[in-house]
Image (cartoon, rainbow, N blue to C red):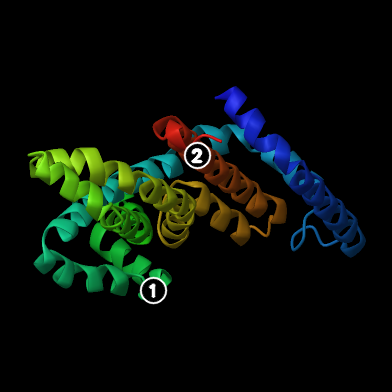
Amino acid sequence: MVTFLRKRLLPYAGSLVFILLLLSFWEIGARIYDRAFILPTPSGVVIRLWELRDVLIGVHLPATLQVILVGLGISILFGGALAVAMNQYQLMERTFYPLVIASQTIPIIALAPIFVLWFGYSIWSKVAVTVLITFFPITVGVFDGLRSSSRDQIELLKTMGANTRQIFTKIQVPSALPYFFSGMKVAVTLSVIGAAIGEWLGASRGLGYFSRRMMTQMDGAGVFAPIVLLSILGILLFLFVKWMEYQSMKWRKR
């Protein structure tokens, strides 16, 4: 995986330089503004992150990661199953596809308090928000991937006597994999946002909860510190999905 990351990250050296320039402007501007409780310097955020490392990494990061993994797991399991069912049965597609689309028109920030009412401050209120956000890209990605299967290849297998299961595993699943991983790359980044929103509105642990708590104390650097961790977590999850995609589809190596 180290070799994979080195090969993939080196071409993005320009982005790294641009980010360093932005941070430099931020540092200078924040020092001139001199209102750390509103706009802390990047160096101040790093120092605060180091000071809070035990509670952030030891207590709140595992809580947020648990919400993300459970939410993603549910979305993959039920989203994938629903996509397969919609691909197999037209009645399922006509019944559920509009509902999947409609789910994305609901403002998540408005539903999150309702989930808190239903599930309390347990993990499930945050998981529900995460599932609602990540279910759509995974379901639509798998469904579109299954639909992209070559009709000619399917007909060829049928003439050779292949049954439905063999057509599914030999043709449709490989065709759906690129779409699945594209949906996953969107879903993992959205899952971080979903978990943070859920924790902001009702939680006793988690990076989103800790960020809100620091805001009530007017600790600007303390607000940014968990946000930095959330961003790093999202990037690591994205890179992990990229690595899984690379390992699963070696025929697409360039």
Disc on the earlier residue, 1 or 2: 1
Quadrant in which residue 156 is drawn: top left
Quadrant in which residue 112 is drawn: bottom left
Query: As drawn, is 43 to the left or to the right of 55?
Result: right
Q: Amino acid at mark 2?
A: Lys
Front residue of 206 and 239 = 239
Front residue of 79 and 89 = 89
Query: As drawn, is 191 to the left or to the right of 164?
Result: right
Quadrant in which residue 157 is drawn: top left
Point 77% across, 55% down: residue: 40
Point 60% across, 42% down: residue: 232
Quadrant holding the N terminus: top right
Q: Which residue is mark 2?
A: 242
Q: Which residue is mark 1?
A: 110
Q: Could you tell me which secondary element the residue under label 2 belongs to? A: helix
Point 23% across, 56% down: residue: 83
